[in-house]
Structures are given as structure tokens and as C-alpha cells.
Image (cartoon, rainbow, N blue to C red):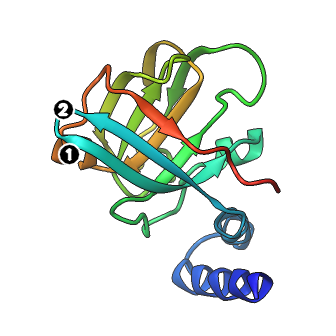
Amino acid sequence: MRHHLANVVCIALLTATAGCDRGVQADAAQTLAQGMVAVTIKSATGAHRFQVESARTQDEQRRGLMFRTDIPRDGGMLFAPYPPSGPPQPASFWMKDTPTPLDIIFIRPDRTIARIAENTPPQSEIPVASGEPVNAVLELRGGRSLELGIKEGDPVSWSAAPTR
């Protein structure tokens, strides 16, 4: 059943992204089929829960949400650990080949928010920096942080990523 569901998701994603490079389509479909991670951010306005894709390997982190226009309202991508190996370090992301605005949330080793880059401009090659060493990054649909009252310093928790 799980294999069948993964095939259905892959076919739907490939159909929806017909204008993209076939290799990118297959990579994105594979990421979707591999599992989700539950993320919770506790802010002054309450606990906000998200079901996001997991980007743990260097290839997954390099690809991120490129070419994606189907980011769910409470979806996104968690880059954890970031970087895939090594100690926390300053991070820098860009939006090249990403057609959807994102909120990029940089997370400290103590799992509090270091910085939020809200509504990053699509397709931009301008680096978005963490400003300090981080060991995780959460990308959400653009505007969600402001909408939910999520702020720097808020605690973030997530479940362990599924085994691959």
C-alpha cells in the first residue's frame, strides 16, 4: 500500500511540474515519498504545528524546495541537521529556481529561532544569512511566520526524521 501511495504521489507531482527538468521532477517526487517530520513552534500566540519534508543529506539540502509551487499552508521543509555533518555554523540560503516566497527560519543548537527571513523573494540569487551559527533551518510558505506571530527566540521542536 505504501509503495502504491508513493507511486501515486510521484505521478501527481510529475504531472504538476511538467515544465521542470525531468531529473528535478524525479528528485522532488522522491523527497515527497520519503516521509514527513512533525515540527512545532511555540510562540506567544500558541503552539503552531507543521508537517514538513525532511532534507537531511547534502543533495536534499542543495535541492530544497526548488521548482516547487505546491507548498501546503502548514508544510515546508526542515534542514536538520544543517549542515549534514559537522558543527553548527553560519548558514546562507538563496531562492534561485524557487518560484514560491518562503519564510526561512534559522534555528540555533538550543532549538530556538535565531532569525526569520520573511517572504524571501522568489528566484532571487541574493544570499539570506542566518547571522549566527545554526544547526537547523525550517522553510515555510511565505508569510506564515507573521500570520502566526512566530518570532525570534521562540522554541522549535520536531520529531526524529523517518528512517530511509
Q: Which mark is residue 44?
A: 2
Q: Position of residue 114 (x, y in %)?
A: 39, 19
As drawn, is 57 to the left or to the right of 154? right
Q: Position of residue 22 (x, y in %)?
A: 71, 73
Residue 76 or 123: which is nearer the viewer?
76
Residue 36 or 88: which is nearer the viewer?
36
Instruction: Indicate the quadrant containing the N terminus: top left, top right, bottom left or bottom right.
Output: bottom right
Q: Residue at x 49, y 36 (%)?
A: 157
**Mark 2 or mark 1, which is nearer to you?**
2
Q: Residue at x 30, y 44 (%)?
A: 47
Instruction: Say if 135 sits above or below 89 in the image.
Output: below
Residue under label 1, please give it.
Answer: 148
Q: Residue at x 53, y 54 (%)?
A: 65
Q: Earlier in the sequence, mark 2 or mark 1?
A: 2
Circle 2 sits in a helix, a strand or a loop, which is it?
Answer: loop
Q: CA distance from mark 2 to mark 1?
A: 9 Å
Circle 1 sits in a helix, a strand or a loop, which is it?
Answer: helix
Determine the image quadrant of residue 45: top left
Instruction: Say if 53 sits above or below 12 in the image.
Output: above
Q: Amino acid at mark 1?
A: Leu
- Residue 122 in view, yes or no: no
Determine the image quadrant of residue 18: bottom right
Q: Amino acid at mark 2?
A: Ala
Q: Position of residue 119 (x, y in %)?
A: 28, 43
